[in-house]
Image (cartoon, helix red, strand yellow):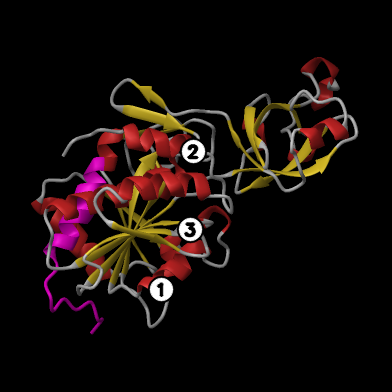
């Protein structure tokens, strides 16, 4: 299949932290409408389907939100204090440029911290804390912030556009998990060109990064009522220094998608994915998740009477940083795998456990 990533780059560059996913969701639905039936819901999930009235029905889910920041206080000197949306390493925030999403449009700023020269020498090696950081948009008073349309609660993302690297690799602040939303839609695009007997619904879910109660994945699985669910997310690439492969396995950029085995994932769906990958000559590795996956799969597999669920992950370097990195080939291998899995299903498919 073609490896055109222009759509992916638009998707990655859309500012859409958890709870404020509208921009990325709009990009996703606009693309999906070219070849599928599209709709959305009150949680912000975006859906696209090919044959959603057919059975078995496969839900393919990738979350469209990203980690970000949110304004918590407007200082009288015109500085903004913030909290984090999702799990940040505060060290990577210092000095970053940010884009605030306000009611009057986007406002650019920078993350400030006391200069190294002014920090007590004994404290210079200490890790920065979020409460010690602020955002500077160039304002001098709280009133100026109001004139810019800035309010408490405004979200922000780091100003880091997608960057193509050599070796067929791509960097972005929003790899996790905008690439999952991309993969499920690319899989649906394949199915739209070669319609199988099974039906498929792709969903760009919301609030995964803050989804302690299941985020948008839980509601999307309930409303779609699929027979099988395939979740696409990222996992840690272990082809960088000082990563303990004994803990997380061996997964390299360009090594293909990662299939998860564990208490959440359904063994028969895993085995079918592995068989399909081998038949299609799609490279893959396997990862163990004995307790939980920390993905939308955790939210989906117990919806209604239970949904046979599998997790397909993309190896990702530097997760939850401004410059996450993936191999483009892994994205398209994953999309092919999902489409081939749907194509392998017969009308009488049964994933009941004996």
State the image quarter where residue 53 is shown. bottom left
Does 339 lie within the magenta span? yes
Magenta-tinted stretch? 332-354
Write down the residue under mark 2: 14
State the image quarter where residue 329 is shown. top left
Residue 104 position within the rendered picture, expressed as x and y whole percent measured from the top left: 67, 38
Crowdedness near tag 2: few (<14), some (14–19) or many (≥20) residues, C-alpha within 10 Å: many
- Does 240 appear above or below 72? above
Crowdedness near tag 1: few (<14), some (14–19) or many (≥20) residues, C-alpha within 10 Å: few
Q: Which residue is pictured at 31% across the width and 72% down the height?
A: 226
Crowdedness near tag 3: few (<14), some (14–19) or many (≥20) residues, C-alpha within 10 Å: some
Determine whether the residue tagged by mark 3 lies in a helix, strand or loop. loop
Q: Which residue is pictured at 87% across the width and 34% down the height?
A: 143
Q: Nearer the viewer, mark 1 or mark 3?
A: 1
Does 348 lie within the magenta span? yes
Q: Is residue 301 visible?
A: no
Check contact, mark 1 vs mark 2: CB within 8 A: no
Write down the residue under mark 3: 294
Q: Nearer the viewer, mark 3 or mark 2?
A: 2
Q: CA distance from mark 3 to mark 2?
A: 24 Å
Write down the residue under mark 1: 223
Q: CA distance from mark 1 to mark 3?
A: 22 Å
Q: CA distance from mark 1 to mark 2?
A: 26 Å
Determine whether the residue tagged by mark 1 lies in a helix, strand or loop. helix
Residue 62 position within the rendered picture, expressed as x and y whole percent measured from the top left: 39, 54
State the image quarter where residue 57 is shown. bottom left
Q: Which comes sooner in the sequence, label 1 or label 3? A: 1
């Amino acid at each position: 299949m073609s490896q055109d990533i222009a759509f992916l780059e638009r998707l990655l560059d859309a500012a859409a932290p958890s709870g404020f996913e509208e921009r990325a969701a709009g990009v996703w639905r606009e693309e999906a409408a070219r070849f599928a039936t599209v709709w959305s819901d009150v949680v912000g999930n975006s859906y696209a389907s090919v044959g959603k009235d057919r059975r078995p029905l496969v839900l393919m889910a990738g979350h469209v939100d990203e980690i970000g920041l949110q304004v918590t206080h407007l200082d009288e000197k015109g500085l903004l204090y913030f909290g984090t949306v999702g799990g940040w390493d505060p060290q990577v925030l210092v000095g970053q440029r940010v884009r605030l999403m306000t009611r009057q449009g986007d406002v650019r700023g920078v993350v400030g911290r006391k200069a190294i020269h002014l920090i007590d020498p004994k404290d210079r090696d200490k890790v920065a804390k979020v409460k010690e950081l602020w955002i500077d948009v160039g304002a001098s008073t709280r009133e100026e912030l109001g004139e810019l349309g800035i309010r408490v609660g405004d979200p922000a993302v780091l100003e880091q556009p997608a960057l193509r690297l050599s070796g067929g690799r791509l960097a972005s602040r929003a790899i996790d998990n905008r690439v999952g939303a991309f993969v499920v839609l690319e899989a649906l695009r394949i199915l739209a060109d070669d319609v199988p007997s099974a039906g498929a619904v792709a969903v760009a879910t919301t609030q995964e990064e803050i989804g302690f109660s299941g985020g948008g994945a839980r509601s999307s699985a309930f409303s779609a009522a699929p027979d099988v669910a395939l979740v696409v997310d990222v996992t840690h690439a272990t082809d960088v220094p000082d990563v303990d492969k004994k803990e997380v396995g061996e997964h390299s950029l360009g090594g293909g998608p990662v299939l998860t085995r564990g208490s959440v994932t359904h063994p028969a769906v895993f085995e079918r994915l592995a068989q399909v990958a081998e038949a299609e000559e799609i490279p893959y590795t396997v990862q163990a998740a004995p307790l939980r996956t920390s993905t939308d799969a955790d939210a989906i597999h117990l919806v209604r009477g239970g949904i046979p669920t599998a997790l397909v992950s993309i190896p990702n370097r530097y997760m939850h940083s401004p410059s996450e990195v993936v191999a483009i080939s892994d994205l398209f291998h994953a999309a092919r795998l999902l489409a081939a899995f749907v194509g392998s299903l017969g009308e009488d498919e049964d994933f009941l456990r004996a």
